[in-house]
Image (tube, rainbow, N blue to C red):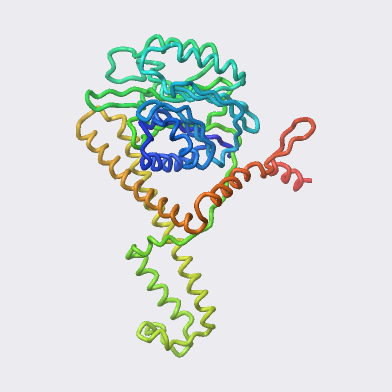
Amino acid sequence: MNELKIVSLNCRGLNNSNKRRDALDYLGKTKGDIYCLQDVHWNERLKESISLEWNGSCYISPGTSNSRGVAILISAEANVTVDKIHCDSDGNLIALVIKTLTYCISLVVIYGPNDDTPDFFKNILTILEDFGTPHCIIVGDWNLVIDPSLDTFNYLHVNNPRARQMVLNMQRELNLYDVWRVLHPDDRHYTWRQRNPVKQVQLDFFLVSSGLLNTVLKLSISSGYRTDHSLISTTFNLRNIKVGRGVWKFNNSLLDDDHYVKMVKDLITETVGHYACFPYVRSNICNIAKSEIQFVISDQLFFEMLLCNIRGRSVSFSSYKKRSENNREKYLINELDRIDPCYHESEDTRTYIDQLNHELEVIRDKKLQGCLVRARADWVEHGEKPPKFFLNLEKRNYVSKIINHLEAPISKISTIRMIYRRKLLQ
């Protein structure tokens, strides 16, 4: 399916390198195409480092090392191009004009001011007018709510009322819709919470122009990672390119798994018995010295068959182990999504949420260590920067090399699949 997935998260600071790598890796697992990040705490000094760490395009409106900062990270596989860029001077806003095969969209990412500042949102109108695109998406942490009766819990007053009124005016003027409220008119779901006193509020949401509403396939609110905000994402029915699997390599951490080691030893015995000469009794093959066993095939061919069998079992074992770990991680995330709305009910519930978050962080830390090991191995094999640079460059160029549609003189677009189908029917 042709999809464009936009993910948004208030990160609550990513200036620490370990947290930044972990969070970016976690975000990558959401399989988004565009990541809209707020409160990243990235200053001018960090911009170059982020560009090297992220595999794709990176656009940053820097704040300071301990406040503000917004960014748009575009995956290398995303089939989009950037036409215009606008950043404010405070690290609260960044806007791009992105183009896909059939759409030209203004994408605005905001980190709304904590004070009641309507001029901030009025400035968005000026930016969008300057961009002049037919469609727009505004997303981020707004620090205000559209509907106080549905979007807040345990709040006595409406925060930033003048700024909120400006957003409502902007909705009417630009014909913008809150995607969550369109799909869930009466649901209560919050994206930020605090423990003492217990408060919850929906500060993070998408506003999209009316022309994009019919392209929305899915909107989700899920628990954030290493932040007090939830992660929100919207999938649009736009063009996207899918890639196949990579090259399999042996994961030597399997050698620390007793079950895997025993499986391989049993497989070696099984393979020896399978190719041993007829006089040997296969049930007794383990009691014969390996150096004395004669095979019905050459030693070289036996070695190749043994490696082939071990590889096959290793692939299936690794897949099973990874699937089990991913299922556990998925369970933790789903359980957090389920229990988050009950955050205010009791201290036991909040303690349980902390335990789930801790276990999730342990699992993620293990995966991060694996990423670091693979990065060191890649450095040893290919060197430091040039191979990675050229490989990433080729990866980005891969999208532009694919012919996934043809446009006739009458401007009728046909996919390759449609053309083949017509040829077969003729």
Which residue lies at the image location 34% right of the left edge and 63% below the top edge? Answer: 256
Query: Is any part of residue 179 visible from this angle?
Result: no
Left or right: where does residue 406 sit relative to residue 278? right
Residue 255 falls in image quadrant? bottom left
Residue 220 horizontal side relative to residue 100, left or right: left
Image coordinates of residue 295 in percent, x first then y, are: 49, 85
Q: At 50% from the left edge and 19% from the top edge, which residue is drawn?
A: 177
Residue 157 image offset from top left, x and y in percent = 30, 12
Residue at the extreme front of the image, as rendered: 45
Q: Quadrant of residue 408?
A: top right
Above or below: residue 15 compared with residue 206: below
Q: Quadrant of the N terminus?
A: top right
Question: Which of these two is toward me, 207 or 14?
Answer: 14
| 272, 376: nearer the viewer | 376
Q: Position of residue 60 (x, y in %)?
A: 48, 30
Give the left or right position of residue 425, taking residue 288 as reference: right
- In the image, what residue occupies the spot 75% across and 43% down? 422
